[in-house]
Image: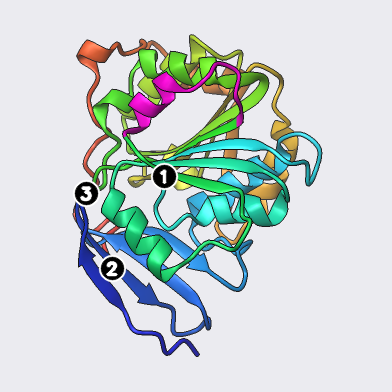
Amino acid sequence: MNDSIPVARATDRGFAKLMPDVDRKRAWLLTVDGAPQSYVDLDEPTHLEFEYAIRLGHVLDSVGESGRALDVVHLGGGALTLPRYVAATRSGSRQDVVEADRGLLELVVEHLPLPEGSGIDLHAADARAWLEAAPAGSADVLLADVFGGSRVPAHLTSVEYAREAARVLRGDGVYLANLADATPFAFLRSQLANFATEFEELALIAEPGVLRGRRFGNAVLVAAHHPLDTAALARLTASDAFPARVEHGPALREFIGAARPVRDEDAVPSPEPPDGTFGIG
Protein backbone atom coordinates (compact mmCIF):
# COMPACT_ATOMS: atom_id res chain seq x y z
CA MET A 1 0.00 0.00 0.00
CA ASN A 2 1.24 3.49 -0.88
CA ASP A 3 1.30 5.64 2.29
CA SER A 4 3.04 8.59 0.63
CA ILE A 5 1.60 12.07 1.14
CA PRO A 6 -0.05 13.99 -1.72
CA VAL A 7 1.79 17.06 -2.98
CA ALA A 8 0.13 20.18 -4.40
CA ARG A 9 1.84 23.23 -5.82
CA ALA A 10 1.17 26.18 -8.09
CA THR A 11 3.59 25.91 -11.04
CA ASP A 12 4.38 28.39 -13.81
CA ARG A 13 1.30 27.47 -15.85
CA GLY A 14 -1.21 25.82 -13.54
CA PHE A 15 -1.89 24.07 -10.27
CA ALA A 16 -0.31 20.63 -10.06
CA LYS A 17 -1.06 17.74 -7.73
CA LEU A 18 0.86 14.51 -7.23
CA MET A 19 -1.38 11.89 -5.65
CA PRO A 20 -0.20 8.45 -4.52
CA ASP A 21 -2.00 5.38 -5.82
CA VAL A 22 -3.24 3.46 -2.79
CA ASP A 23 -2.98 0.16 -4.70
CA ARG A 24 0.63 0.44 -5.93
CA LYS A 25 3.49 1.13 -3.55
CA ARG A 26 5.41 3.85 -5.45
CA ALA A 27 2.90 4.91 -8.08
CA TRP A 28 1.64 8.45 -8.58
CA LEU A 29 -1.00 10.34 -10.55
CA LEU A 30 -0.17 13.86 -11.75
CA THR A 31 -3.02 16.29 -12.38
CA VAL A 32 -2.79 19.88 -13.60
CA ASP A 33 -5.78 22.13 -12.96
CA GLY A 34 -7.78 19.01 -12.12
CA ALA A 35 -7.08 17.21 -15.40
CA PRO A 36 -5.11 13.93 -15.24
CA GLN A 37 -1.77 14.39 -17.01
CA SER A 38 0.43 11.41 -16.17
CA TYR A 39 0.66 8.21 -14.16
CA VAL A 40 4.03 6.85 -13.04
CA ASP A 41 5.04 3.71 -11.17
CA LEU A 42 8.61 4.31 -10.01
CA ASP A 43 9.14 0.59 -9.35
CA GLU A 44 7.70 -0.48 -12.72
CA PRO A 45 8.40 2.19 -15.36
CA THR A 46 7.06 -0.05 -18.13
CA HIS A 47 3.58 0.07 -16.56
CA LEU A 48 1.41 2.46 -18.60
CA GLU A 49 -1.91 3.26 -16.98
CA PHE A 50 -3.66 5.66 -19.37
CA GLU A 51 -5.17 4.20 -22.53
CA TYR A 52 -3.52 6.75 -24.83
CA ALA A 53 -0.14 6.13 -23.18
CA ILE A 54 -0.48 2.40 -23.79
CA ARG A 55 -1.11 3.12 -27.49
CA LEU A 56 1.88 5.44 -27.67
CA GLY A 57 3.91 2.67 -26.04
CA HIS A 58 2.84 0.22 -28.75
CA VAL A 59 4.09 2.62 -31.43
CA LEU A 60 7.36 3.20 -29.58
CA ASP A 61 7.88 -0.56 -29.36
CA SER A 62 7.44 -0.85 -33.13
CA VAL A 63 10.23 1.59 -34.07
CA GLY A 64 13.28 -0.20 -35.47
CA GLU A 65 14.60 -3.41 -33.99
CA SER A 66 13.24 -4.40 -30.59
CA GLY A 67 15.36 -2.95 -27.79
CA ARG A 68 17.53 -0.77 -30.06
CA ALA A 69 18.61 2.51 -28.48
CA LEU A 70 16.81 5.53 -29.94
CA ASP A 71 17.20 9.30 -30.03
CA VAL A 72 13.82 10.56 -28.82
CA VAL A 73 12.41 14.06 -28.43
CA HIS A 74 9.38 14.45 -26.17
CA LEU A 75 7.39 17.65 -26.58
CA GLY A 76 5.54 17.93 -23.28
CA GLY A 77 6.89 16.44 -20.08
CA GLY A 78 4.16 15.67 -17.58
CA ALA A 79 5.54 13.23 -15.00
CA LEU A 80 8.00 11.84 -17.59
CA THR A 81 6.04 8.61 -18.00
CA LEU A 82 7.05 7.79 -21.57
CA PRO A 83 10.69 8.92 -21.22
CA ARG A 84 10.95 6.50 -18.28
CA TYR A 85 9.31 3.79 -20.42
CA VAL A 86 11.81 4.28 -23.26
CA ALA A 87 14.74 4.30 -20.81
CA ALA A 88 13.53 0.96 -19.41
CA THR A 89 12.78 -0.71 -22.76
CA ARG A 90 15.54 0.86 -24.90
CA SER A 91 18.70 0.93 -22.80
CA GLY A 92 21.21 3.53 -23.99
CA SER A 93 18.62 5.79 -25.59
CA ARG A 94 19.22 9.53 -25.61
CA GLN A 95 16.12 11.53 -24.81
CA ASP A 96 15.28 15.21 -24.69
CA VAL A 97 12.14 16.33 -22.86
CA VAL A 98 10.84 19.81 -23.67
CA GLU A 99 8.35 21.23 -21.17
CA ALA A 100 7.26 24.89 -21.06
CA ASP A 101 6.35 24.74 -17.35
CA ARG A 102 9.67 24.89 -15.48
CA GLY A 103 7.88 24.67 -12.14
CA LEU A 104 6.20 21.43 -13.18
CA LEU A 105 9.53 19.90 -14.19
CA GLU A 106 11.02 20.89 -10.84
CA LEU A 107 8.08 19.39 -8.94
CA VAL A 108 8.32 16.10 -10.83
CA VAL A 109 12.07 15.58 -10.50
CA GLU A 110 11.93 16.56 -6.82
CA HIS A 111 9.29 14.00 -5.89
CA LEU A 112 9.59 11.45 -8.71
CA PRO A 113 13.33 11.48 -9.47
CA LEU A 114 14.72 9.95 -12.63
CA PRO A 115 16.97 6.91 -12.23
CA GLU A 116 20.72 7.50 -12.35
CA GLY A 117 22.09 7.35 -15.88
CA SER A 118 18.64 7.49 -17.49
CA GLY A 119 19.90 9.40 -20.54
CA ILE A 120 16.99 11.84 -20.17
CA ASP A 121 17.77 15.57 -20.50
CA LEU A 122 15.14 18.09 -19.42
CA HIS A 123 14.60 21.46 -21.10
CA ALA A 124 12.29 24.18 -19.77
CA ALA A 125 11.36 25.69 -23.13
CA ASP A 126 8.54 26.25 -25.59
CA ALA A 127 8.08 23.15 -27.75
CA ARG A 128 7.89 24.96 -31.10
CA ALA A 129 10.87 27.22 -30.37
CA TRP A 130 12.98 24.27 -29.24
CA LEU A 131 12.02 22.26 -32.31
CA GLU A 132 12.90 25.13 -34.67
CA ALA A 133 16.38 25.33 -33.10
CA ALA A 134 17.00 21.56 -33.19
CA PRO A 135 19.39 20.11 -35.81
CA ALA A 136 17.89 18.54 -38.91
CA GLY A 137 17.77 14.75 -38.93
CA SER A 138 18.60 14.47 -35.23
CA ALA A 139 15.75 12.31 -33.88
CA ASP A 140 14.46 8.78 -34.43
CA VAL A 141 11.19 9.57 -32.66
CA LEU A 142 9.35 12.82 -32.03
CA LEU A 143 6.53 12.40 -29.52
CA ALA A 144 4.15 15.32 -28.94
CA ASP A 145 1.91 15.32 -25.87
CA VAL A 146 1.53 19.05 -25.26
CA PHE A 147 -1.52 20.49 -23.58
CA GLY A 148 -2.01 23.96 -22.18
CA GLY A 149 -4.65 22.96 -19.66
CA SER A 150 -6.74 20.54 -21.70
CA ARG A 151 -5.97 21.98 -25.16
CA VAL A 152 -3.10 21.67 -27.63
CA PRO A 153 -1.70 25.22 -28.14
CA ALA A 154 -2.41 26.78 -31.55
CA HIS A 155 1.26 27.17 -32.55
CA LEU A 156 1.58 23.36 -32.43
CA THR A 157 -1.36 22.73 -34.76
CA SER A 158 -0.16 24.26 -38.05
CA VAL A 159 1.42 22.90 -41.22
CA GLU A 160 4.56 24.96 -40.45
CA TYR A 161 4.86 23.02 -37.18
CA ALA A 162 4.45 19.74 -39.08
CA ARG A 163 7.21 20.86 -41.45
CA GLU A 164 9.58 21.45 -38.51
CA ALA A 165 8.76 18.02 -37.12
CA ALA A 166 9.58 16.42 -40.48
CA ARG A 167 12.86 18.34 -40.66
CA VAL A 168 14.06 17.19 -37.22
CA LEU A 169 13.21 13.53 -37.81
CA ARG A 170 15.56 11.15 -39.62
CA GLY A 171 14.37 9.50 -42.80
CA ASP A 172 13.34 6.34 -40.94
CA GLY A 173 11.95 8.28 -38.00
CA VAL A 174 8.41 8.31 -36.59
CA TYR A 175 6.25 11.17 -35.37
CA LEU A 176 3.48 10.44 -32.90
CA ALA A 177 1.10 12.72 -31.06
CA ASN A 178 -1.64 12.51 -28.47
CA LEU A 179 -4.62 14.55 -29.67
CA ALA A 180 -8.25 14.87 -28.58
CA ASP A 181 -11.40 15.72 -30.50
CA ALA A 182 -15.02 14.77 -31.16
CA THR A 183 -17.35 14.70 -34.14
CA PRO A 184 -17.28 16.35 -36.67
CA PHE A 185 -13.50 16.05 -36.08
CA ALA A 186 -12.57 19.38 -37.67
CA PHE A 187 -9.42 19.59 -35.54
CA LEU A 188 -8.32 15.99 -36.01
CA ARG A 189 -8.89 16.10 -39.76
CA SER A 190 -6.88 19.32 -40.07
CA GLN A 191 -3.98 17.76 -38.15
CA LEU A 192 -3.95 14.76 -40.46
CA ALA A 193 -4.07 17.11 -43.47
CA ASN A 194 -1.09 19.03 -42.06
CA PHE A 195 1.04 15.92 -41.67
CA ALA A 196 -0.06 14.47 -45.01
CA THR A 197 1.79 17.35 -46.67
CA GLU A 198 5.09 16.28 -45.04
CA PHE A 199 4.86 12.51 -44.51
CA GLU A 200 4.06 9.67 -46.88
CA GLU A 201 2.48 7.36 -44.30
CA LEU A 202 -0.18 8.20 -41.71
CA ALA A 203 -2.15 6.20 -39.17
CA LEU A 204 -4.69 7.08 -36.50
CA ILE A 205 -5.33 4.99 -33.38
CA ALA A 206 -8.50 5.53 -31.36
CA GLU A 207 -11.37 3.71 -29.69
CA PRO A 208 -14.20 2.81 -32.07
CA GLY A 209 -16.64 4.85 -29.97
CA VAL A 210 -14.55 7.97 -30.48
CA LEU A 211 -14.14 7.36 -34.21
CA ARG A 212 -17.90 6.83 -34.57
CA GLY A 213 -18.51 10.21 -32.95
CA ARG A 214 -20.13 8.86 -29.82
CA ARG A 215 -17.92 10.81 -27.42
CA PHE A 216 -14.98 13.17 -27.04
CA GLY A 217 -11.70 11.29 -26.64
CA ASN A 218 -8.04 10.80 -27.38
CA ALA A 219 -6.54 9.73 -30.69
CA VAL A 220 -2.92 8.92 -31.47
CA LEU A 221 -1.60 10.30 -34.76
CA VAL A 222 1.36 8.45 -36.31
CA ALA A 223 3.37 9.77 -39.27
CA ALA A 224 6.42 8.42 -41.09
CA HIS A 225 8.21 8.47 -44.45
CA HIS A 226 8.24 4.67 -44.58
CA PRO A 227 5.49 2.04 -44.39
CA LEU A 228 4.11 1.54 -40.89
CA ASP A 229 3.44 -1.95 -39.57
CA THR A 230 -0.24 -1.18 -39.12
CA ALA A 231 -1.16 -4.87 -38.96
CA ALA A 232 1.04 -5.37 -35.88
CA LEU A 233 -0.27 -2.17 -34.29
CA ALA A 234 -3.84 -3.27 -34.97
CA ARG A 235 -3.24 -6.61 -33.24
CA LEU A 236 -1.72 -4.92 -30.20
CA THR A 237 -4.37 -2.23 -29.83
CA ALA A 238 -7.22 -4.71 -30.38
CA SER A 239 -5.98 -6.82 -27.46
CA ASP A 240 -5.80 -3.93 -24.97
CA ALA A 241 -8.24 -3.72 -22.06
CA PHE A 242 -9.94 -0.89 -23.97
CA PRO A 243 -9.53 -1.98 -27.60
CA ALA A 244 -8.73 0.58 -30.28
CA ARG A 245 -8.80 0.63 -34.08
CA VAL A 246 -5.95 1.58 -36.40
CA GLU A 247 -7.12 3.61 -39.38
CA HIS A 248 -4.77 3.99 -42.37
CA GLY A 249 -4.69 3.97 -46.16
CA PRO A 250 -7.94 4.60 -48.06
CA ALA A 251 -10.07 4.60 -44.89
CA LEU A 252 -7.93 7.35 -43.37
CA ARG A 253 -7.96 9.38 -46.58
CA GLU A 254 -11.74 9.13 -46.53
CA PHE A 255 -11.75 10.30 -42.91
CA ILE A 256 -9.60 13.32 -43.81
CA GLY A 257 -11.99 14.13 -46.64
CA ALA A 258 -11.81 17.74 -47.85
CA ALA A 259 -9.88 18.99 -44.79
CA ARG A 260 -7.11 21.42 -45.71
CA PRO A 261 -3.77 22.09 -44.02
CA VAL A 262 -3.88 24.97 -41.53
CA ARG A 263 -1.26 27.72 -41.68
CA ASP A 264 0.14 29.54 -38.65
CA GLU A 265 -2.05 32.59 -39.18
CA ASP A 266 -5.21 30.45 -39.12
CA ALA A 267 -4.22 27.90 -36.48
CA VAL A 268 -6.39 27.44 -33.40
CA PRO A 269 -5.99 25.33 -30.23
CA SER A 270 -7.58 21.91 -30.05
CA PRO A 271 -11.22 21.98 -28.88
CA GLU A 272 -12.14 22.41 -25.24
CA PRO A 273 -13.22 19.06 -23.77
CA PRO A 274 -16.80 18.93 -22.51
CA ASP A 275 -17.12 19.47 -18.76
CA GLY A 276 -16.10 16.39 -16.81
CA THR A 277 -14.42 14.63 -19.73
CA PHE A 278 -11.00 14.34 -18.12
CA GLY A 279 -11.29 16.04 -14.74
CA ILE A 280 -11.28 14.04 -11.52
CA GLY A 281 -12.39 16.80 -9.16
The residue pinned by badge 1 equals: 218
Q: Which one is earlier in the sequence, the residue at label 1 or at label 2?
A: 2
Q: Position of residue 236 (x, y in %)?
A: 69, 48
Occupied quadrant, residue 247: top right
Against 96, residue 112 (above or below) is: below
Graded by Cα atoms within 10 Å as few (under 14), some (14 to 19) or many (20 or more), the crowding at tag 2 reads many
Dot 3 amino acid type: Pro
- Report whether 181 appears left or right of 254: left
Dot 2 amino acid type: Lys
Question: Which of the two discs, 3 and 2, sits closer to the camera?
Answer: 2
- Report whether 52 appears left or right of 20: right
Instruction: Tell me, for residue 17, which label it has, or none.
Output: 2
Q: Which stretch appears magenta?
A: 126-140
Q: Which one is earlier in the sequence, the residue at label 1 or at label 3?
A: 1
Rounded to the nearest angstrom, the CA distance separating label 1 from label 2 is 22 Å
Rounded to the nearest angstrom, the CA distance separating label 1 from label 3 is 13 Å
Instruction: Tell me, for residue 274, which label it has, or none.
Output: 3
Q: Is residue 11 magenta?
A: no
Graded by Cα atoms within 10 Å as few (under 14), some (14 to 19) or many (20 or more), the crowding at tag 3 reads few
Dot 1 amino acid type: Asn
How are the residues colored?
rainbow
Q: Position of residue 189 (x, y in %)?
A: 39, 23
Q: Which one is earlier in the sequence, the residue at label 3 or at label 2?
A: 2
Against 206, residue 3 (above or below) is: below
The reply to whether discs 1 and 2 touch (Cβ–Cβ < 8 Å) is no
Q: Position of residue 161 (x, y in %)?
A: 38, 19
Quarter that holds the C terminus:
bottom left
**Viewer-closest of 258 and 47:** 47
Residue at 30% across / 36% down in the picture? 152
Residue at 41% across / 44% down in the picture? 218
